[in-house]
Image (spheres, rainbow, N blue to C red):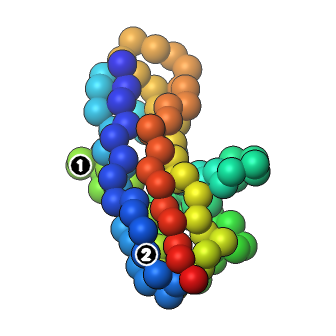
Amino acid sequence: QVQLVESGGGLVQAGGSLRLSCAASGSIFSIDAMGWYRQAPGKQRELVAAIISGSKTLYADSVKGRFTISRDNVKNTVYLQMNSLKPEDTAVYYCNIRAAVLLRDASLDYWGQGTQVTVSS
């Protein structure tokens, strides 16, 4: 009922920038929160950034000051602007929304397909 489509990943040199986007579609009634996670090989998936109602944002300490999360409420799209990229930022990045769909009481988590970000030294 809900689909997330990600784009914007790629290969970039250290110090460069990328902008990820994730568009949500389907029978969405409301969105409680949107966020970005990443997972490097052999490591646990970790929260990178999140945005909730009232434009409140959260960032992992490792990306604070370099990454910015934003949301377009009309398009149901979340963005992650990534500046000053480092090799340790290399991972698959997944977008996530917590949303209620039509005729459902509870909100559920939905995930994008993932997009690869590779930062070379």
Q: Can residue 80 be seen in this view?
A: yes
**Direction top: furthest residue:** 103
Residue drawn at (52%, 84%) of the image: 14
Q: What element carries label 2?
A: strand
Image quadrant assignment for residue 26: top left
Per the image, the residue denoted by label 2 is: 12
For disc 2, the neighbor class at 10 Å (few under 14, some 14 to 19, many from 20) is: some
On the rendered structure, is 120 left or right of 18? right
Q: Which mark is residue 106?
A: none
Q: Can residue 71 be seen in this view?
A: no
Measure the C-alpha gap from mark 2 to mark 1.
30 Å
Per the image, the residue denoted by label 1 is: 74
Residue drawn at (51%, 16%) of the image: 105
**Direction right: furthest residue:** 43
Residue drawn at (52%, 73%) of the image: 119
Counting from the top left corner in percent of width and height, residue 21 is at 35, 56
